[in-house]
Image (tube, grey):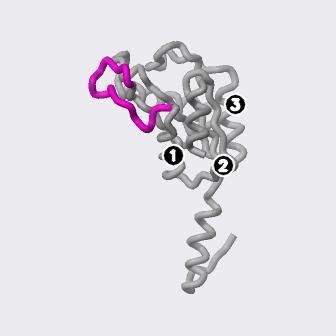
Amino acid sequence: FFIDIGVPDSLTFARETVAEQLRRPALFLDRDGVLNHDDNYVGTSERLRWMDGAADAVRAANNTGAYVFVVTNQAGVAKGYYREEDVQTLHRWMAEELRSQGAHVDDWRYCPYHLEATVPTYRQAHPWRKPEPGMLLDLMKTWPVDIEWSLMVGDQPTDIAAASAAG
C-alpha cells in the first residue's frame, strides 16, 4: 500500500484512506464471568480464577485483527472492598498473564460507581456503569472501531443492554 502525499489531492486521499485502513471490528468483553470466574468482588490476582480458554479466545480475536476491549463494572470499589488502584493493578497483571500466552487486550475500561455505594465518592448514577453504554462509547470514540462488525460478550443482561445502547 503506497500513497504519494506530495500533492494536496493525494494528501487528502491519504488522510481518509489511512483512517479507514485502521478501522476494524472490536470484541468487547465483560470481565467477571467471561474472562474470569465471578467470585464476588475480585480485586486482586490472588482471588482471580481464569475461565478455561479465556486466553485462547482473546488470542483468536487478536489473530482475526479485531480490537479486544474489556468493559467491567467494579462495584467492589464503590462498596469499599478494594480501591481503584487495586483494579488497575489487577488489570496490569491480567494483561501480563495474557501476553505470556500470546494474547493481548487493546484497552480496558471499568466503572467504580454504584447507586448503593458505601464509599460516598462513588455513590452516583454514572454513564459508564452498564447497562449504560458509556464505556463502549468511549472506546469507540478513542479507537477506529467498525461498529457494524463488532460484538459484546457478557454474562449478564446489563452487558447486552449496554451493547444495544452503544449500537
- Per the image, label 2 sits on a secondary structure element best described as loop
Which residue carries the number 1 mark?
Answer: 137
* Residue ID for mark 2: 25
Q: Given the image, on which type of amino acid does mark 1 rest? A: Leu
Q: Position of residue 129 (x, y in %)?
A: 46, 32
The type of residue carrying mark 2 is Pro
118 in the magenta segment: yes
Q: What's the mark number on residue 56? A: 3
* Secondary structure, magenta segment, majority class: loop
The CA span between labels 1 and 2 is: 14 Å
Q: Is residue 104 placed above or below 112 in the rendered structure?
A: below
Give whichever of discs 3 and 1 has the lower sequence position: 3
Numbered label attached to residue 114: none
Residue beneath the point at 56% across and 71% down = 15
At 58% from the left and 31% from the top, the residue drawn is 159
Cα separation between marks 3 and 1? 26 Å
Q: Which residues are magenta?
A: 115-130
Quarter of the N terminus within the rendering: bottom right
